[in-house]
Image: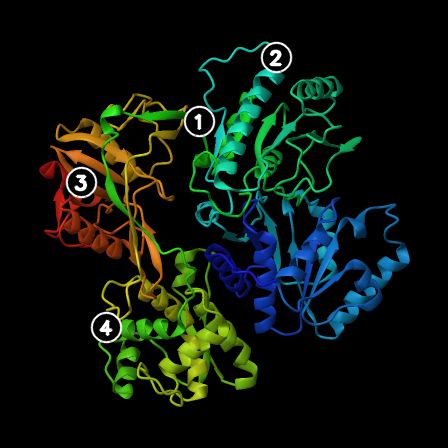
Amino acid sequence: MAIRLKNFQLKAIDSLLQAMQSGKRDIVLKSCTGSGKTIILSHFIEAYNRSFGNTVFIWLTPGKGNLEEQSKAKMDKYVHGASTKLLGELITGGFGAGDACFINWEKLTKKGNTALRDGEKSNFIDNVGKAIDAGLKFKVIVDESHQNDTIKADEIIGYFKTDKIIRCSATPKAHKNALLVEVPEEDVIAEGLIKKLLIINENFEQNVTVDDQITYLIDKALEKRTQLHSALLKLGAAVNPLIIVQLPNKSDALLDSVEKYFYGKGLTYENGGLAVWLSEKKQNLDGIEEPAAYPCAVIIKQAVATGWDCPRAHILVKLRDNMSETFEIQTIGRIRRMPEARHYENDLLDSCYLYTLDGAFTESVKQSLGKGALDAKKLFLKPEMRSFALVSEYKTDVPFPRDPSLILRVFSEHFKTKYSLTGKHSENKTKLLANGYGFGQDVIDYTKSGSVSKLEKEQIDDLNAISVHEELNTTKHGRAYHHCAAEIGLKVTLDYARINTVLRKLFLRESASAHKILSLEVRELYSFIINNKARLVSEIREAMASTSVQQTIKVNKITEKTIGFPAELLFTYDGAAKAQGEMTKNVYKGYLASAEKRSTSEKLFEKYCQQSRGVDWFYKNGDKGAEYFSIVYEDNSGKQKSFYPDYVLSVNGETWIIETKGGFSKTGESEDIDRFTGKKFAVLQRYLKKYGLKGGLVRQDKLSYELCICTETFSEDIQSAAWQLLSEIF
């Protein structure tokens, strides 16, 4: 089953491939529950094996739950032709190049484990030795690494004499000198795989006093489940949202009370509405993960089995004390997946919910998830704002395949514009040489030579730089070329075959193309790509966002719709923040100064709006969803992207649209990390002129601590006339 990898998954694969080339033995992959960690690792193994032969991957899994079988099944499903094996096959048949071997490490270490007799263990170890003698190189993946007993796991790892260990977890333990590859949680959320927010104790009173926690909490959960189910039915989604009730250990009396309460609500084991997953009691669990499965609630005591995926789980009622931090995060992870791996663009459905009276648990979850776990309450739009409307733009709802021919044109034009290249390939080579590009037929590695008295960065940097040249061998270095080209392709989500075509048309003499900028022989092309990989990766990223590249593509259709502000808002805030005052100029009644999630720039701007005499009202726009205001722009490959400006406001009766960005440092350097700011500014100007509105970019100048605004011409120089003090404008 072929799947389209998400952009963050492609980035993670790229980062893992680069990490494998580093000098670090230990690599830590931190990837939140729901991010498709198994899919990332499976495709990483496939990509690595394409570039490096004689490799065997050992995928170690912990404990119960048959996680090794689940992981193997997923790799078989998503990677066509994968050579996957379980422990039994390795005992009898040994290892082969390109194998991905899934092993429950406890079967090799646990004493008295009848699943593996002494003779079988000896055979396994013998086969490892034979594989090493045959020239095979083992790479080890330690899955759910936070659960592994380090001493016992390291005993198993020692068998393989590996130089690379990838430790994977949503909550990894610290490993000294390890290289961290982290999948940003916000990227997983942006792709719609996990819910946007965890809402804790929604609409709880400030001081809660209850006679019975079961009655109070489960009532809240059942009410929320009804709301969720109703909203899903309106959307036509065949999803039955599930409540997870977690009990303390040694709580038989509490179990009886919970069961009795659910029975009183018409949810029983007999009618299938209630399920239970305890070591001593299991009922109605078959198919419970399916989106439309009948059970409405499941009772558990401990965190459900590692690897258990139940995306319809939406609500957690926690009645347990004294859990470790890791345990908490893993449990919360069970309610964070989206039921259909997409957001519904509905705050109610795109959030998950925790109900608990355990203050310590609540606090530790907030610390663990940061701004991903917030207090919440419902706010309503002020009556006088109900008539306001804007025209919002939306992308065409058509999957966008990357066009290699367009990327070729954009990449070529980027080079020509940036380096003043012409149609004369020999002159182009001279110009690129002058700008630091390396040419020749040798593959070059760089190292240091000399001595240091202390292992300090300054002394090491002062060592002599040495370049080590190796004559290129197309057979030997073919894999290296393949690997480097694939890394460049990952930046624009092109597979190896298509990016290889682009690179050949750009640089290879024998490939005919009007967009060619160099005429290299095959050997020169190989060394050029290998030696300049880092530069080329940066160039292709820059090319996609560049405002100087002139597009020659047909503009895609844009859908327009007049919208107002949402009538009600699920408002999230930090209840522990010092500033809790109401921002009366916001369009919603009860909007607090502790609003989250907000960047520093957004917080400064909201405070400015509240204090400014010229501002009549302001609205914080959402960042995803049809109910929020958006403008459509395109990257340089023609892919449509949605831009959600941060704020809509009224200034002295005129409507303004404002986008806030990272500031300028005290030395004037830009702290904006968005590559597409220039394009967003241009499309905002187009929109403002079309509808006769005002607006621009707002950023903080950290030298003066003032907010500045750019309204006419985009500039990255805070000293330029393009930037004015916001206080001089309104």
Q: Amino acid at mark 3?
A: Trp
Label pair 3/2, CB-CB below 8 angstroms: no
Q: CA distance from mark 1 to mark 2?
A: 22 Å
Residue occupying image coordinates x 49% and y 77% = 481
Front residue (pair 479, 178): 479
Residue matched to label 3: 656
Q: Which residue is mark 1?
A: 375
Residue 10 visible, this angle: yes
Which residue has dot 4 on it?
417
Which of the two discs, 4 and 2, labels the residue nearer the N terminus? Answer: 2
Query: In the rendered view, would you say 574 is above or below 11?
Result: above
Q: Residue at x 38, y 82 (%)?
A: 505
- Counting from the top left corner in percent of width and height, residue 71 is at 68, 54
Q: Which residue is mark 2?
A: 212
Viewer-side residue, 266 vs 404? 266
Residue type, mark 4 in image: Thr
